[in-house]
Image: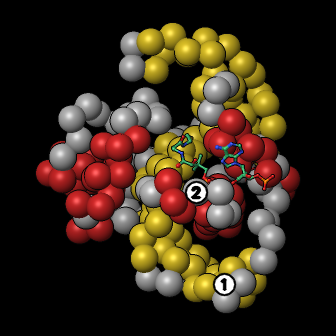
Amino acid sequence: MEIKNQIIFQKGLDSYEFAPIGEDDVTNHYVKALQDQKSYVQNIHENISLEKQKAYVKKIRLSKDDGIFGLLVNGQLIGTSGVQNIIGPGFTTIGIFVFDKINRKKGYGKTLVWASSYLLSQTLGCSKFSAGMEKTNIASFKTFKACGYDILKEGKYDIFQESKDCFIMKLNAPDLVVPEDISGVRLA
Ligand SMILES: CC(C)(COP(=O)(O)OP(=O)(O)OC[C@H]1O[C@@H](n2cnc3c(N)ncnc32)[C@H](O)[C@@H]1OP(=O)(O)O)[C@@H](O)C(=O)NCCC(=O)NCCS
């Protein structure tokens, strides 16, 4: 869906922006990161190319209640957050991705989870969130956990036609935990 809102904030000395992205934000760097990662959520198609990813982002932008956001740190796109079921009943689902392995374990994942949950609850009235990950994806589990998410259920889910042991985590908006060092948050 067309989302107009964004958040601007500081983390330590760095300037952050969390804003919806469109086709023009899909770069070769973004696509290469997706190709290197292979897969992490159900809705990424195989053989990702620049054109296919642009079309995918456009489809989300024109969708009824899905969205895709980028996290910019000092003007550089570090990662994305894909959100589903923004206006529908039930849980709004969040999936996060930090492009470069060199940028992982630096707090960007937590910032993506916090910013997604915060923006959607403050501006679009979302009140409960969920996220799914394979049980082996410790990084994802710990990232959502650190932001206040907890296990809702666990079980076998199909990811790319393969049955995988997964956790589904959930958060009620008031339980959202703000990562350390975030200040000067402005909704725009
Ligand atoms: C999941 C992902 C977004 C996490 O991003 P990140 O920037 O590394 O996360 P953070 O730096 O905010 O780390 C959050 C917590 O997880 C821990 N963590 C991160 N990666 C870890 C790993 N590989 N092993 C163990 N712990 C890890 C951090 O130490 C931190 O814990 P703390 O709060 O106790 O300090 C990133 O690994 C990624 O993009 N993975 C590929 C895509 C994916 O799997 N997405 C999740 C599907 S929804």
Specify which label sits upstream in the sequence, 2 or 1.
1
Q: Which residue is mark 2?
A: 104
Q: Nearer the viewer, residue 106 or 15?
A: 106
Q: Is residue 96 visible?
A: yes
Q: Nearer the viewer, mark 2 or mark 1?
A: 2
- For residue 68, what is the image quadrant? bottom left
**Quadrant of the image containing the C terminus:** bottom right
Amino acid, disc 1: Gln
Spatial separation of the CA atoms under disc 2 and disc 1: 19 Å
Identify whether 72 is placed above or below 102.
Answer: below
Residue most toward the right? 175
Q: Is residue 124 visible?
A: no
Identify whether 176 is placed above or below 13.
Answer: above
Secondary element type, mark 2 = loop
Q: Position of residue 87 (x, y in %)?
A: 53, 48
Q: Which mark is residue 32?
A: none
Q: Position of residue 24 (x, y in %)?
A: 23, 68
**Pointer 2: residues within 10 angstroms few (<14), some, or many (20+)?**
some
Q: Residue at x 39, y 20 (%)?
A: 160
Residue most toward the front? 102
Amino acid, disc 2: Arg
- Any atom of ligand 1 within 8 Å of the CB at mark 1? no
- Any atom of ligand 1 within 8 Å of the CB at mark 2? yes
Q: Position of residue 51 (x, y in %)?
A: 14, 51
Side of 128 relative to 79 (left or right): right
Q: Which residue is mark 1?
A: 10
Secondary element type, mark 1 = strand
In this picture the colour scheme is secondary structure
Q: Position of residue 149 (x, y in %)?
A: 78, 44
